[in-house]
Amino acid sequence: MLDLGRLREAGAIARRIRDEVYRAVKEGVKVIEICEIVEKGIRELGAEPAFPCNVGINEVAAHYTSPPSDQMVIPPRSIVKVDIGVSLDGYIADTATTVVLSPEFEAMSGASQIVLHEAIKAMGPGVNVSQIGFIIQKTANKLGFKPIRNLTGHEIKRYQLHTGLTIPNIAAPVPGKLQVNHVYAVEPFLTTMRAAGEVVSAKLATIFRADPSGLKMEKLRSEERRLLSYLVERFKGLPYTPRWIDGFEEKLHERLVRLGRIHAYPVLVERSGQPVAQAEHTVVITEEGCEVIT
């Protein structure tokens, strides 16, 4: 059963941390510093990160977090997405914002917020998720931008970041209707009209997840069972980064990834190299419509 009080607390923490992002993201700042500000701030407020802080620069849309000892810095005149997840007893608030360091990106960033607002206005019990995608695409196109067609919003359950329904960002015949007391993240990603409008996987992955169900430990070596059990117990099926693990055993971890026992989230990049903006809120559907949690 949904504990709306805990979810609202997680949302309040997410909002507070999101406000700090605007002060943290500056030209020349190391990406790892931004990640650590976000993650440390969440922990200091009594919660845990639901996933590693994502920092997507320019054409990078999603799934980049700093690996250990990352030296990457925020480049000049860039557009930076920061995606934040807060877990409070497994109740997850997921939110994202875009920081622009050049006037050329202000319209795209502003459009992502407008598109998000219009999508949320339409959310309520019984609404087809395909209708949300139609509104996102129509609004984005009217403002002169293109949504990323293969990135979507998603349903959220306790300790499950992506589950159940998907919320499309384009007009598409996606099945499903929004339900009362269900929690959803809606997150339009926008790019330019000349862009491909889709993301592709880069070779790099810095975020991982160990699935707590059906592990079949008996087929693994003892050291593999030890590491996998540790990851499941510590992160409870939520995404993590090697930065969070003292004495990280890289080769052993890589072997479990190759065996398919650990899921890697590849960095996602706009296929034609065009910049991307993102806005995101978590909402809970009510009898009257929806409540924005973040």
Image: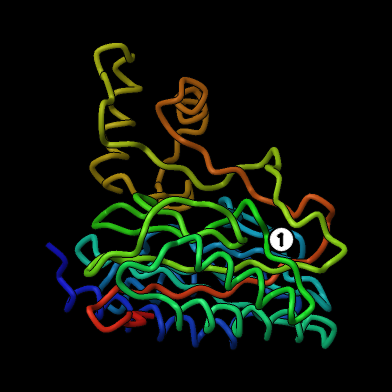
Q: Position of residue 59 (x, y in %)?
A: 76, 60
Image check: 169 left or right of 214? right
* Residue at far top of view: 219
Image check: 88 left or right of 257? left
- Give the structural element (helix, strand or loop) at label 1: loop
Query: In the displayed structure, would residue 152 be above or below residue 85?
Result: above
Q: Which residue does the numbered mark 1 point to in the structure image? A: 72
Query: In the displayed structure, would residue 223 be above or below residue 68?
Result: above
What's the image's color scheme? rainbow
Q: Nearer the viewer, residue 122 or 282?
A: 122
Looking at the rendered image, the quarter that the C terminus falls into is bottom left
Q: Residue at x 45, y 54 (%)?
A: 166
Q: Position of residue 75 (x, y in %)?
A: 79, 71
Q: Residue at x 83, y 56 (%)?
A: 273
Q: Residue at x 70, y 50 (%)?
A: 199
Q: Position of residue 49 (x, y in %)?
A: 37, 64
- Tell me which corner region of the image, top left, top right, bottom left or bottom right, holds residue 278: bottom right
Q: Residue at x 62, y 61 (%)?
A: 170
* Residue at far left of view: 1
Image check: 272 left or right of 164? right
- Disc tally is 1
- Tell me which corner region of the image, top left, top right, bottom left or bottom right, holds residue 120: bottom left
- Tell me which corner region of the image, top left, top right, bottom left or bottom right, holds residue 219: top left
Q: Position of residue 161 (x, y in %)?
A: 36, 55
Query: In the displayed structure, would residue 238 be above or below residue 123?
Result: above
Q: Nearer the viewer, residue 284 or 254?
A: 284
How dense is the environment of label 1, judged by Cα within 10 Å: few (below 14), some, or many (20 and up)? some
Image check: 273 left or right of 199? right
Looking at the rendered image, the quarter that the N terminus falls into is bottom left
Q: Nearer the viewer, residue 32 or 123?
A: 123
